[in-house]
Image (cartoon, helix red, strand yellow):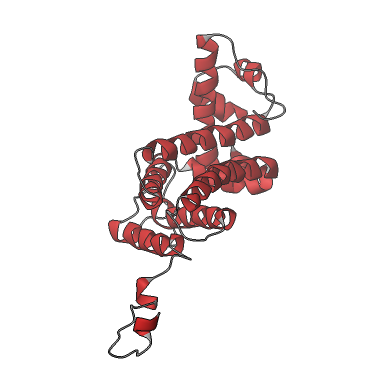
Amino acid sequence: MSESARKPPSTKRGTATRKAIIDAAEHVFAEHGYADASITRITERAGVAQGTFYLYFDSKLTVFEELVEDLNRRVRHAMSEGSAGATTRLEGERAGFRAFFAFTAEHPALYRVVREAEFVSPRALKLHYTRIVEGYIANLERAREVGDVGEIDPEVVAWVLMGIGEMVGMRWVLWGDEPGRTLGPGATATVPDHVFEQVMAFIERALAAGHPDPADHPAADPATDPGADQR
């Protein structure tokens, strides 16, 4: 929870009202941007009075930071659930990336709001990325320990993988088929299958870094290597 946010409500009705405000903020910030968003627009969309807003949030900045954290929780949950049944790290990446792209197609504010956080609330931006990376690092460390991936640096690879997901998603989910043109508010596309498979082929090769490749060390042939039978 952001530093200036009020304590969570203690009743179901209060919890529902607070959620309605955050949901409304997601749409308003995504559609209008932080500068043109207003508490009035948020409360009108949520169907609550402005006085009710201040029962839960101190300011526009407060609800913005809460929205970043809310989106972060939800996208991490979606990725975790998506990859829960995976038996290998690569399977986990495939399922996790699919879940990420599906979530961003449903919640384009994840891109628009988080990118604005760079200027509006750098603290919220850093928290968003580091929380995602922490889980990535833990999974990659476990995979390296059991030999499921090569001799990679989990921290470096975690940041690289997150960057891949964000850039590919922005290009094909947020922009659609036409590069450089953002779709209208609330509109998204999907990552084409051929793009997804290219991404996964790249990631598979990257995760295998450090694994010995039998093709690089062919078995010695006694017919062409006189010393082979002496080894």
In terms of image quadrants, where is residue 216?
Answer: bottom left
| Quadrant of res 194 | bottom left
Q: Nearer the viewer, residue 231 or 110?
A: 231
Q: Residue furthest front?
A: 230
Relative image position of residue 196 (x, y in whole percent):
34, 57
Q: Position of residue 58 (x, y in %)?
A: 69, 24
Residue 210 is at least partly visible in this image: yes
For residue 118, side relative to residue 199 (left or right) = right
Which is nearer the eye, 175 or 81? 81
**Residue 116 x, y percent position in the rendering:** 60, 46
Nearer to me, 205 or 34: 205
For the C terminus, the image quarter is bottom left
Q: Relative to 144, is 39 above or below?
A: above
Residue that extends furthest to the right in the rendered view of this protein: 4
Q: Height in image: 76 above or below 173?
A: above
Residue 17 position (above or below residue 83): above
Viewer-proximal residue, 187 or 89?
89
Residue 180 in view, yes or no: no
The reply, left or right, for residue 75 in relation to residue 131 is left
Instruction: Give the position of the N terminus as an image quadrant.
Output: top right
Which residue is pictured at 61% across the width and 34% down the height?
Answer: 64
Q: Position of residue 107 (x, y in %)?
A: 44, 39
Q: Name the residue rendered at 43%, 62% in the picture.
A: 208
Residue at x 52%, y 56% (from the top left corner): 163
Tag count in the figure? 0
